[in-house]
Image (cartoon, rainbow, N blue to C red):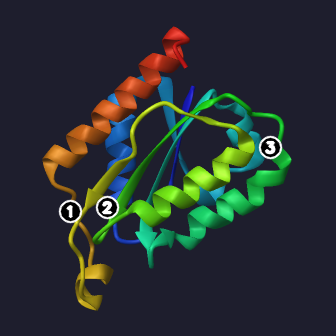
Amino acid sequence: MLTIVWHSRTGAARAMAEAALAGAGEGARLVPASEATPEVLLEASGYLFVCPENLAALSGAMKEMFDRAYYPLLGRIEGRAYATAIAAGSDGRGAQAQIDRIVTGWRLKRVAEPLIVNLGAQTPEAILAPKQVPEPDLQRCRELGAALAEGLALGVF
């Protein structure tokens, strides 16, 4: 089962996570970062982490999820598949790199290229405003969800 762990403050990452779930179908479940306990994560066979980049880093809620789950899962989920989808204002690579560093300790295996959706929010007003993710980017999220769910179901990952 693919577990899609997400956090969103302005709606973009949530829309991306929901699109990935739509693509994955019944082979996935959507879990807010605040509810992603070690037990929930242990039940998954693979992960899609979806969050915004805030100040060139993970959002605090997503980082807190990793902080809460890291040691209880250490040595228990090695080799499982993961991918990422980042909602960014201009770059996204900081959050991406932070996730990659964290899951290196869990020894997860990246199975898809990072998906970064750059929404171009550069002013305080634009950064804080609710976001609409363009349809082509939502389609990319659906395709990522479908590929991850199918790969897990077939035992490819």
Q: Vertically, is 23 above or below 66?
A: above
Dot 3 amino acid type: Leu
**Tag 3, which secondary structure?**
helix
**Tag 1, which secondary structure?**
loop
Name the residue: 28% across, 56% down: 117
Is 13 in front, or is 75?
A: 75
Q: Which residue is label 2 attached to?
A: 12
Q: Distance between the residues labelled 1 and 2?
A: 6 Å
Q: Residues within 10 Å of mark 1 (few under 14, many from 20)?
A: some
The x and y percentages for residue 1 are: 57, 25
Q: In this view, does 91 lie to the left or right of 42?
A: left
The residue most toward the bottom is 124
Q: In this view, does 103 lie to the left or right of 57?
A: right
Q: Which residue is label 1 attached to?
A: 132
Q: Which of marks 2 and 3 is in front?
A: 3
The x and y percentages for residue 54 are: 44, 74
Q: How far apart are marks 2 and 3 (CA)?
A: 28 Å
Is 154 in front, or is 17?
A: 154
